[in-house]
Amino acid sequence: MAKKVAIKPLIALLCLIVIWGCSWPVYKLAVPYTPPLLFAGMRAFIGGLLLAIFIFHLRSKINWRKHWKKYCISALFNTICFFGIQTVGLIYLPGGLFSVLVYFQPVLLSLFAWIWLGEHMSPIKITGLLIGFFGIAVVSVDGLIHHLSGIGVFLGLLTAICWAFGVFYVKKVSGEVDAFWMVALQCIIGGAVLLGVGTFLESWSAIVWNAKYFTGLGFGSTLGIPVAYVIYYSLVNAGDAGKVGAFTFLVPIISVLIGTIFLKEPVTYTLLAGLLLVVISISFVNYSGRTRAPLFKKTRKQTIM
């Protein structure tokens, strides 16, 4: 009987990892047909609205007057910078390669916790950090040599840094705000800002309203934000947040496989070697993290993605 109960969170976890893994090639499919900031703003804004509708009955937990600064700061890092920079970056690099760079975030988050919080660095974690930095160096060299886009590599790493700052901040305030409303409002606020900037710098007439564009927009504003976060926080509330972190390494693997099979994105031995090193690094960091005290006392509302 216990085994049957355990199947549900396992299926939910696999669905979440698949959604995250598919997002990069799906967005890559859409970006040639839309200005990047408008695309990022639309999927964030619509996704945030859908999630807000879903949790509208919990609106008393918003407490806007007290927490509006927290929502805005989270929107800056987790929506404006994260979604905005990643969408621009996907113009320059294949989705699989870009996801490898972005999913260096767990390693950066661990590094930030060490620098700013004085968190203990175990030998396993230090080894993981070193392996991760070497893996990213290998992937970056591969991107520069084979894809001729130093800008893309820079934007991928910048996306990871912004995401790490965003997660770090959300963890810090997780005991003060409702997790679902944090996601919904950061997406609505950040999406509105991206749409405003995109309207000023880009052109709505440049959007090609074809099937590929609607696939990317539809995926991001439904599965990519509301569904993924509902699944994630359901797992968190059930005490399975650690499992999500431990399986994060599967996301870039899935992205590379999907990009190679369906989008014919190039895969080199160097990219595979770098991907393997990043996987090992994330595994080491998450493994050591499960054997110590939590980063913050209240972590039931933390977010990974």
Image (cartoon, rainbow, N blue to C red):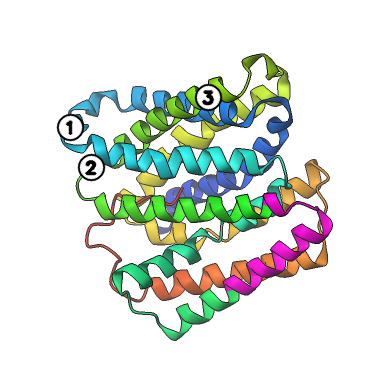
Q: Hey, which quadrant is residue 153 in on the image?
A: bottom right
Residue corresponding to mark 1: 63
Residue sitting at the far front: 201
Residue 162: percent from left, percent from top: 47, 51
Residue corresponding to mark 3: 42
Q: Is residue 24 above or below residue 247?
A: above
Q: Which residues are magenta?
A: 132-152
Q: Disc 2 or 1, which lies upstream in sequence?
A: 1
**Residue lying at 82% horizontally and 61% vertically, measured from the top left:** 145
**Residue lying at 45% horizontally and 38% vertically, measured from the top left:** 79
Q: In what element is the residue under mark 2?
A: loop
Q: Residues within 10 Å of mark 2 (few under 14, many from 20)?
A: some
Q: Hey, which quadrant is residue 22 in on the image?
A: top right
Q: Is residue 136 magenta?
A: yes
What's under tag 2, amino acid-wise?
Val
Q: Is residue 244 magenta?
A: no
How far apart marks 3 and 2 lie (CA) works out to 25 Å
